[in-house]
Amino acid sequence: MAPRKIIIDTDPGQDDAVAILLALASPEEIEVLGITCVAGNVPLALTTRNARIVCELAGRPDIKVFAGSDRPLKRDLITAEHVHGKTGLDGPVLSDPIMPLQEKHAVDFIIETLRSEPKGSVTLVPIGPLTNIATAFEQAPDVVGNVAEIVLMGGAYFQVGNITPAAEFNIHVDPEAAARVFGSGVPLVVMPLDVTHKALVTRARNDAFRAIKNRVGEAVAEMTDFFERFDREKYGSEGAPLHDPCTTAYLIRPELFSGRHINVEIETTSDLTLGMTVADWWRVTDRAPNALFIGDIDADGFFSLLTERLARL
Ligand code: BDR
Ligand code: CA
């Protein structure tokens, strides 16, 4: 089967970095048409820098990286340096990128790609706030029906929230954008905290990254070492959740994941629960399903896949 064409929309972020590395290590299954950056974990100037660092780390300076929205649609930007460090990619020592940033705006790239590629052949993989995707849909409603699928990291039901007691970071940062995407009619696969909190980088899994003994394995081990300290302190868990790579792993091995086709709506008005993903997991409403909301993962299978693929880089 031909590889799936994807655009990764991202705010790297150590876990974004691993998601990108996994995609670039898997050319049989995934063709990365471009990487579009958004402000999120850190401001846009840093996410565009970090995305290029990751491409160079993977030995892929040919990948096109675009700068997109520098702030949410209607709100001030909230960042997460307390999790990811000052650069967003704290942990390993990585030099500034040499590869250029594309001149085109990320939103224009998304729109043009969806118009030029055959209808239904491009999958969007957003792993940051949904500002770029919502803006593309707003500016060019004709492209919405061309998207094959959106496989995103965001939201929570059983885990409720991480940036507030009621909301997950990516959705909370730009709830209006999320509402636009969840209401777009495009088939959605959603990786909420419910599943990513089962993908924990335990000591043994981190050691396995390090034991790959290539530059990538070492860098990934140092990245996960870095953000682990935050999650250990916060959750007392045996390791940090590796959120964003659940999306790219799903594109390679969907059978590692299971969930329910349900309705998910985004709270955009309440101060207390802003950005909450109101997921009808128990199907108590008659609202039409709009997402495959993932709840479970074969975590050992996921980490074996990751380790095997990172060893290829
Ligand atoms: C999400 O927020 C970011 O901090 C991570 O990169 C991930 O995309 C998890 O809530
Ligand atoms: Ca992210």
Image: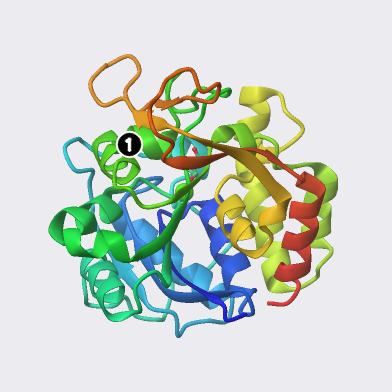
Which image quadrant: the N terminus?
bottom right
> Picture coordinates of residue 248 (x, y %)?
58, 60
- Above or below — where is 158 with respect to 113? above
**Could you tell me if residue 196 is visible in this image?**
no
Along the viewing direction, whichever of 220 and 193 lies nearer the viewer: 193
Q: Amino acid at mark 1?
A: Val
Going 71% across and 68% down the picture, which residue do you hit? 310
Along the viewing direction, whichever of 168 and 208 lies nearer the viewer: 168
Which image quadrant: the C terminus?
bottom right
> Picture coordinates of residue 229 (x, y %)?
65, 35
Element marked by disc 1: helix
**Could you tell me if residue 232 is visible in this image?**
yes
Going 56% across and 51% down the picture, which residue do you hit? 15
Along the viewing direction, whichever of 161 and 233 lies nearer the viewer: 161
> Picture coordinates of residue 108 (x, y %)?
21, 69
Mark 1 sits on what residue? 173
